[in-house]
Every structure is written in C-alpha cells, then in structure tokens.
Image (cartoon, rainbow, N blue to C red):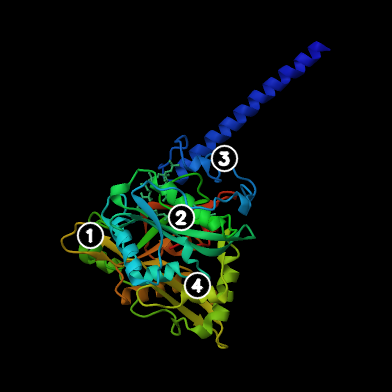
C-alpha cells in the first residue's frame, strides 16, 4: 500500500514537474510573444515596484476571461488625500479658470510626451484641453495637480474623465486617464505613482473601479500593442524637421509628387457634421464600434461633444443618403507638436485619425477625402493607429509605419490580449 502511495506521490511529483515545465515554457513563449508584439522594448522580468502592487495582470500571464481583478467597496477607500512631500500640495484644477488652464497648458507644453529622439513634444492647445477634459458629466475633482507650496508653480498633473467602455460585450463604467505629467526637474522621484494612486482614490470615491489609458511605455500589462502610421502631407517640412528622411535616390520634388493628395474629394456630397446629423451619425458609429473588443459607448450628447467640428480641435465630415441619414463619417483631431531646437520650424501641425465608418463608399475613398481636407487645412502630417479597420487602407494611401508603439491598458479589468484590429477606442 505504502509503495502504491509512494508511487502515487512519485507520479504526482512527475506530473507537478511536467506541469511546471509546461507552465514555464508557455510563460517563456508568452515573454517571447510579448517581446515581438511590443517591438523588443520590453523586459518581462523587469520588476515594477509600483505596478506590481496594482490590480493589473502580470506581464507574462495569459488572460483567458474578462472581468474585474479585485472587488472593493467604498469602505475600503481612503477618505483623505495621499501624503505628499512637505514642499508640495494637492490642488484641484478648475479648467474654466483661464489662469489655471494656462498653468496646465504650460506644464504640458514644456514637459509632456516627447518622441524617443527628443525632436518633438506634443503641444495640446488650450481649446483642445478644454474639449478633452470637459465631456458631459465630467467631474472637476478628477483634474488634479501638484503645486510647489511656496511658489504655487504647477509641477504635476493627471486627469480622469468618465467613459462607458464595451469590453468583449460587457459594458463597464470607467474613467479614461490622460495627461499624466511630472515636471522634468522632478522626474524619477516616484511622484507619478502618487498621482496615479490619488486619482484612483478620487475615482473610487465615485464608485468607479476600472480605467482605460494608453502609454508609450510597456508596463503590466497591455491589452493591445498598437502602432502609429504617418501620411506626409508636407514632405519638405517633415524632412527639414527630421520627422522623416528623404529616401535614397529620391529627390525632394519626387517626394512631393509622390505625396500629393486628391485635388477634390472623391465624394461630391461630403460635408461637415451638423447637430441634425447626430441621431443617425451616433447610431452609425455605435453599431460599427460594437464589433470591436474594446470600444466606447457614447450617448448622443457625448457623441456631439466628441465629434462637433471645432476649428483647431476636432473635425468630422459625413456623407448622407437621400433621406438625410448619415451613411459614412470620417473624423480627426488636431494635435500639433513643438519642434525642439530647429532653427526653421517651431511647430508641426498633425491631424490624428479619430473615428471613421464607411458604408456607402469604400473606407479607402473616405480616408482619401480625409487626407484631402487635412491638406487643405494645412496639416503637415496625418497620423493613424493600426486599430479598427485602419490597416485596410494604410499602405495604399501611403502611410508609413512610425517607430513608436502605443500600448492600450485597462486598470482592474483583465481581458484576453487583443490585436490592434480589435481595438475600437481612441484616447487623446
Ligand atoms: S500617458 C502619458 C504619460 N506622460 C508622459 O509621458 C509625459 C512625460 N513624462 C512624464 O511626465 C513622467 O515621465 C511621468 C512619469 C509622469 C510619465 N503610465 O515618478 P516616477 C510608472 C503609467 O519615478 P517619472 C498617460 O497620461 C513607471 O512604470 N505608469 O517616474 C496615461 C514606474 O512604476 P514601476 C507610468 O518618470 C497615464 C513609476 O511610474 C508611466 O518621474 C496612465 C515611476 O514613477 C505612464 N505613462 O514620471 C496612468 N510612466 O516602478 C495610469 C511611468 O512600477 C492610470 N510610469 O514600473 C491607471 C488608472 C488609474 C485610475 C484607476 C481608477 C479606477
């Protein structure tokens, strides 16, 4: 009997070991896949002292089911703000107060996201920030800053806005986190985790427990790893700014010729979105987005906020049928970058593809019209992620792959890893 038992135990050991091996080799595989997916910018064994304490999936875990990672109640939420080092204080930023908005603009203008070579830095305009931070039902409590007590200088910022997100057909009330920024002089002092924990607390106090966010860096754990593609509209300026290089054996005049866009839109009736279009345009977009694994759910009020054409902020063009129903829409937002240390150019004017739906015309024709309008409005470049159905037109419309990846994340919600084409959400 004991032999038998021993044998059983041995069998158990063997099966444990082989299980361990299988788990190990599938973890190894995962790491390899993560490396490929994220353009080799990831070390899966790198510790993340902050993120390892948060309700996010470990980097090399295979997620099989969607759902919250931890369940908490309001009783679990700290009632007072997190402590800050003595020199600093928390502030709520009132976006309707021009001086406070200007402080946020200046912090971001001087310290926000740069490319890997530090040639460009996003320059979100004041009008853009108002639009991005004040959608319907926004909470002013979710625009938080850190000031130096003595000088009142704003040195840190993070924001949240309410959003309803569809994840694999589950509709989840979330917050979208954006504009996390710490002044360059205060970097690598672990202030970012304090900002993230404080916004988490303030969001939790509203009984919301999930968030969506994007970032250039890889932390535990991307839902999808997406890539930016760029369509030159002003190739000469892009070369002069070192945004792109003149390809070998190509002259500037040939490059300009190759990047021409249509003189006229392909659709004779395409026109800017108006308020009357909202019911049919919103229905069109919501039906389209529902096919993706991660996408926003918008009310008509939210749709009008996000898509209402506003000069230098966001643009949306539509095509309608004979009954006036919107059948196609294309949209983009305006996000210039400061050109750092260039004697000739100070600003690069970039359009970023937002939401596009084509039902009566091919998507590629609709996007060619978007390029036409963007060129007419003097954009230098049209940027587009390889999400939704965008990969179907990128090559033919002469978009070039960029070197930056954009990672999509969910906080306190695990879901199987998605391909870019399964993402239907654009964060600003
Ligand atoms: S993405 C845009 C982020 N902003 C910039 O890139 C602007 C320029 N850079 C900076 O201002 C600073 O470098 C920042 C970091 C502020 C980014 N997302 O204080 P530290 C982790 C998440 O010493 P600093 C956007 O706005 C990092 O892995 N975590 O670092 C979405 C490390 O943790 P760990 C990030 O360089 C933001 C720790 O911080 C990011 O001085 C979504 C180091 O802290 C990042 N972009 O400051 C935020 N960058 O050791 C998450 C660094 O563990 C929201 N880190 O690796 C989560 C949901 C919250 C709400 C939940 C509600 C339910």
Residue for point 48% across, 75% down: 305
Q: Would you call the spot at circle 2 few (<14 residues within 10 Å), some (14-19), or many (20 or more)?
A: many
Residue 403 visible in the picture: no
| Residue 426 image point, x, y percent | 47, 63
Q: Which mark is residue 61?
A: 3
Dot 4 and dot 1 residues touching (CB under 8 Å): no
**Residue that numbered label 2 is attached to:** 214
Residue for point 52% across, 41% down: 53
Q: Which mark is residue 241?
A: 1
In the image, the residue with mark 4 has its CB under 8 Å from the nearest atom of ligand 1: no
Quarter assignment of residue 181: bottom left
- For marks 3 and 4, give the CA distance: 39 Å
Q: Would you call the spot at circle 3 few (<14 residues within 10 Å), some (14-19), or many (20 or more)?
A: some
Mark 3 or mark 2: name the one nearer the start of the chain: 3
Quarter assignment of residue 231: bottom left
Mark 2 or mark 1: name the one nearer the start of the chain: 2
Mark 3 or mark 4: name the one nearer the start of the chain: 3
**Residue that numbered label 4 is attached to:** 362
Residue 282 visible in the picture: yes
For numbered disc 2, what is the local secondary structure? strand
For numbered disc 1, what is the local secondary structure? loop
Mark 1 or mark 3: name the one nearer the start of the chain: 3
Mark 4 or mark 1: name the one nearer the start of the chain: 1
């Amino acid at each position: 009997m004991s032999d038998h038992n021993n044998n059983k135990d041995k069998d158990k050991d063997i099966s444990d070991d082989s299980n361990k091996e299988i788990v190990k080799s599938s973890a190894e595989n995962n790491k390899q896949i993560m490396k490929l997916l994220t353009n080799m910018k990831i070390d899966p064994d790198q510790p993340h002292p902050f993120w390892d304490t948060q309700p996010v999936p470990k980097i090399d875990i295979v997620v099989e089911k969607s759902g919250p990672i931890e369940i908490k109640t309001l009783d679990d939420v700290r009632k007072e703000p997190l402590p800050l080092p003595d020199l600093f204080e928390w502030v709520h930023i009132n976006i309707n107060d021009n001086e406070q908005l200007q402080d946020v603009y200046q912090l971001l203008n001087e310290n926000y996201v740069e490319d890997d070579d530090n040639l460009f830095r996003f320059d979100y305009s004041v009008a853009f920030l108002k639009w991005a931070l004040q959608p319907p039902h926004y909470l002013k409590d979710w625009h938080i800053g850190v000031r130096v007590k003595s000088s009142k200088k704003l040195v840190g910022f993070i924001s949240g806005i309410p959003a309803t997100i569809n994840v694999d057909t589950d509709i989840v009330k979330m917050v979208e986190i954006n504009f996390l920024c710490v002044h360059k002089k205060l970097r690598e002092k672990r202030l970012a985790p304090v900002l993230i924990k404080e916004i988490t607390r303030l969001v939790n106090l509203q009984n919301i427990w999930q968030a969506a966010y994007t970032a250039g860096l890889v932390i535990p754990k991307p839902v999808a790893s997406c890539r930016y593609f760029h369509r030159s509209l002003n190739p000469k300026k892009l070369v002069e700014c070192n945004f792109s290089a003149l390809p070998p054996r190509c002259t500037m005049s040939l490059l300009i010729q190759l990047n021409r866009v249509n003189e006229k839109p392909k659709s004779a009736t395409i026109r800017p979105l108006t308020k009357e279009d909202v019911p049919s345009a919103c229905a069109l977009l919501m039906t389209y987005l529902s096919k993706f694994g991660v996408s926003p759910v918008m009310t008509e009020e939210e749709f009008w906020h996000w898509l209402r054409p506003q000069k230098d902020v966001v643009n949306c063009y539509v095509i309608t049928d004979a009954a006036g129903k919107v059948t196609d829409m294309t949209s983009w937002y305006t996000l210039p970058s400061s050109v750092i240390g260039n004697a000739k150019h100070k600003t690069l004017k970039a359009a970023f593809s937002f939401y596009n739906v084509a039902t009566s015309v091919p998507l590629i024709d609709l996007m060619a019209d978007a390029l036409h309008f963007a060129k007419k409005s003097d954009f230098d470049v049209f940027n587009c992620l390889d999400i939704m159905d965008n990969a179907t037109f990128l090559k033919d419309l002469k978009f070039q792959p960029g070197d930056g990846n954009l990672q999509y994340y969910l906080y306190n919600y695990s879901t199987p890893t998605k391909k870019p084409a399964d993402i239907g959400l654009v964060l600003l």
